[in-house]
Image (cartoon, coloured by chain):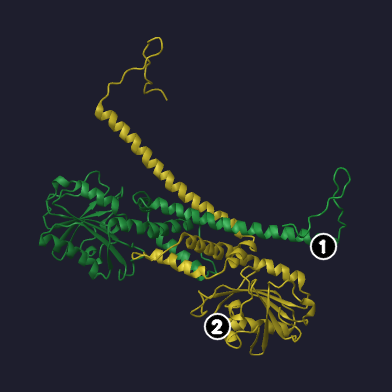
Chain colours: A yellow, B green
Amino acid sequence: MFSVSSLRSSKIRLLNPPSNHPPPISHYFPRLPPSILSLNPQKRAFKHRNLRIRAIDAAQPALPVQRLKRSTLFVDVLSVKEFPRNLFLQILPLEFDVLCTHPMFGPESGKNGWRGLPFVYDKVRIGNEKSRISRCEKFLNIFVQEGCRMVEMPCAEHDRSAAESQFITHTMGRVLEKFGLESTSINTKGYETLLNLVENTSGDSFDLYYGLFMYNKNAMEQLERLDMAFESLKKQLFGHLHDVLRKQLFENAEALEVTEQKPVLPKLLQNGVTVEPPTETMR
Amino acid sequence: MFSVSSLRSSKIRLLNPPSNHPPPISHYFPRLPPSILSLNPQKRAFKHRNLRIRAIDAAQPALPVQRLKRSTLFVDVLSVKEFPRNLFLQILPLEFDVLCTHPMFGPESGKNGWRGLPFVYDKVRIGNEKSRISRCEKFLNIFVQEGCRMVEMPCAEHDRSAAESQFITHTMGRVLEKFGLESTSINTKGYETLLNLVENTSGDSFDLYYGLFMYNKNAMEQLERLDMAFESLKKQLFGHLHDVLRKQLFENAEALEVTEQKPVLPKLLQNGVTVEPPTETMR
């Protein structure tokens, strides 16, 4: 846990995803702008123009809220938004501003720069004072300057949308990783798409994936939908197989009857009377 | 069925994937070189330099082998290889040359040219005569000139490899199509990979997909492997969920015991004698 004794009111707090074994900050914040990381990648304190930014590990047992100065901007960069939003509104006194963000890229997808990559944010609670509004804008501006596509969106809407897109992407990537995709000499374009997907998601930890599932209330529904889609495809495949085989069986049987011209004996009742076949007029 | 009465010995036969309602040749052969298609896109006969090429619909009830001139090169462009290979060796007289090919791209993946795209072929049976060898090379050269990456590979090896790559790609594309992926305002790079995959495979018919499954003996095993990978991921997810919840339950229970400092009464046997707790030395 980092010391908070020297914090001043102008500072911003960043909450990063939980981790049991804290590595250096460059690992924690792969999504912090290079302009910040380049200042001091091994420490948890940054300066960006007139902003002082400190990082807090979300995995620490308790946030030392009572020891922080008032008028601090709290920012989280977690991959789910509604759960931390509700938590912050519940535990942070009204004097704290809350900005929930999700830079929707990671070390792999953002390795060639962040131009055009989506940065989602929700100004959950920003005080009316000019200095507070300006502080929030200055923070967001860091990402504007990096070329991110800024998307303002309520936390709940982010979670609905992310469960359908990001969570399903990670699920597919992990399924294919378990399947054990390997590059072949005859890769189709589509197959290379799958190989890219695995590369894109395999660098992320299981903790992140589990977090996407556990802390997004929409994730389970989407997992079930994916399950149903897979089952439906298998049914379609095996159903078609059944149809084809049945058709062949019946056609073969008919062909046999025609070619062999077997004499058809009339069925007899137990008393020896011939059973009349149903006539054409019967329906 | 097209007329074969005017065929000459220099001609090449192409077998295309089956279809019940023959559309024009440009639809049948999206993978024939543009240089050929441009000659006469509505007919099934092509001329490429000194090669005369005719197309035969593989769905026709019976190949009119007995009506074809000897010394014809048979080429198929189907997406599975071992099944047609064995069929050709069984039904075509020894005088017919057999070249099994798979241009591993379609209308979508090949729309911007074929440079670098894999063209798999297996010279299943090419006569020793110079003219026959040369005819086969001339045909392959059409694709060399289009920039394809030529991969010579036995039919069985193609099918093993294609079941792991092409069939799984189509399966994933179809699962995601059924799931109903939609572009959002916060698409991650990985999610866009999935959207591309659906676009890449959704243009293909179910017949093609069913063919990849039915006529490739390796497909079922790969479908089962994919199923197992999905099940394994779900188990991992729910297993972790179970672990976390159980840990919380037990920790809460322990915390309750410690904080409430309940007096622990010694257990009594039925005769009222106190049961001694196990000592530290017991292991």
Residue farthest toward the top in the current orientation of the protein: A271
Q: In the image, residue A66 lies at what x, y percent?
A: 80, 77
Amino acid type of the residue that numbered disc 2 sits on in the rendered structure: Glu
Residue drawn at x 85%, y 61% as measured from the top left: B260
Q: Alpha-carbon neighbours of circle 1 within 10 Å: few (<14), some, or many (≥20)?
A: few
**Which chain is mark 1 on?**
B
Question: Image quarter for residue A58?
Answer: bottom right
Query: On the rendered structure, is B63 left or right of A56?
Result: left
Of the pair A126 and A170, the residue shown nearer to us: A170
- What's the CA distance linking mark 1 and mark 2? 51 Å
Question: Horizontal and vertical percent for residue A91?
Answer: 76, 71
Label 1 sits on residue: B258
What is the chain identity of the residue bearing mark 2?
A
Whether residue B248 is situated above or below residue A14 in the rendered picture = above
In the displayed structure, does residue B223 sit left or right of residue A41? Answer: left
Quadrant, the N terminus of chain A: bottom right
- Identify which residue is drawn at 36% across, 49% down: B214
